Image: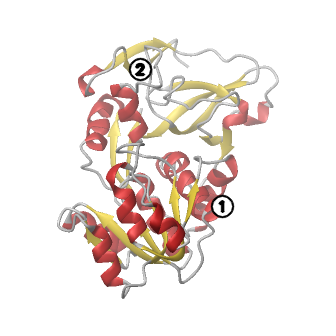
Amino acid sequence: MTPTMKVVALRQHGGTEQLKLEEWPTPHVQPHEALVEVKACGLNYMDVFVMHGMPDLPTEMPRIPGGDIAGIVREVGSGVPAEWVGKRVVLFPRFPKGGVLGEHANGGLCQYLAVDEAQLIEIPDNVSFEDAAALPIAYGTSHRMLFTRGNIKPGEKILILGASGGVGVSCVQFAKMAGAEVFACTSSEEKGRKLRELGADHIINYVDNPEFSRAVWTATEKKGVDVAVNFTGGDTWIQTQRSMANRGRILTCGSTVDHLCQIDVRFLWFRETDIIGSRAYLPEDIKACVAYVASGELKPVVETVLPLDRAAEGIGLLESRRIFGKVIIKP
């Protein structure tokens, strides 16, 4: 290891111009830590929020963004088995005591990162670093939401809002793996074409059809969908409710537009709709995703791979929603 490393860091909130390529000291491992050489870092919309700043979550500066990290263990501290050295790993993004890589502490837009040994998840040789770095936050979140919390079943109809982003794309892939009929909402014809290639059965362009519930109602012969995935929030909730079949389930893992949402209580009791929250991911979800990739059942959608010095460009692609699937940075 060199005494210094390249990082992309924020020193104040703002736009992508605040993301600067810098030289920092290479971290030293503490007891129960491992030093990981970062080979790939996946970006998420969380990185946009960190860049701009969130009123209810102060960010300690400087901050290195990036929560999805894959690499090689190069050194371990006391208390960590020496067998970890040289292993290929993907990192569980949450710290044992709480918080997330790239948000509450430095993330993966750097060449080396010291992490708690509990965050290490070994990956097999047939899983690339790029694919592994696409998995934890987006695919892990979708896996828990659809399978652990949502209990989706073969033959069910599922509506996915924001289907062309990282979580949305992974929901489409998992829903098809489960044998569901997929209704995917997106903003352009080109994104719709890509979603069809992933297996989406119905594409709803919400730019052309702002009242997407009407399109869902027509396509389902006025029966509605069994499951809806809504991590958008804002003004989309009542339309989501209108899209539901009797005794349907609305799944949510976040609110990228606005966390204050209007709900029409009439639809809750009349259609007996369940609203199910899903809080991110567990290590078991990420391990399951790695196993799907290793077996060939799942291929993460990686649209763009950029070098470290173009990380700001990658976050800009997410912010402008000009991306389909995942953006990966290679230090």
Find residue 119 and report its horizontal and vertical position in percent: 67, 36
In the image, 37 versus 290, the foreground residue is: 290
- Left or right: 234 as drawn, with respect to 97: left
Q: Residue at x 35, y 64 (%)?
A: 239
On residue 14, the disc is: none
Q: Which residue is mark 1?
A: 148
Amino acid at circle 2: Lys
Q: Measure the C-alpha gap from mark 2 to mark 1.
A: 39 Å
Mark 1 or mark 2, which is nearer the start of the sequence? Answer: 2
The quarter of the image holding the N terminus is top right
Quarter holding the C terminus? top left
Residue 105 at x, y percent in the picture: 54, 23
For discs 2 and 1, the disc positioned in front in the rendered view? 1
Residue 43 position, x and y percent, is 41, 40
Can residue 86 be seen at all in this image of the molecule?
Answer: no
User: Where's residue 299, x and y in %?
Assistant: 48, 63
Q: Is residue 161 above or below residue 29?
A: below
Question: Who's the residue at 56% across and 32% down the image?
Answer: 100
User: Where does label 2 land, which residue?
Assistant: 6
Q: Amino acid at mark 1?
A: Thr
Figure quadrant of residue 219: bottom left
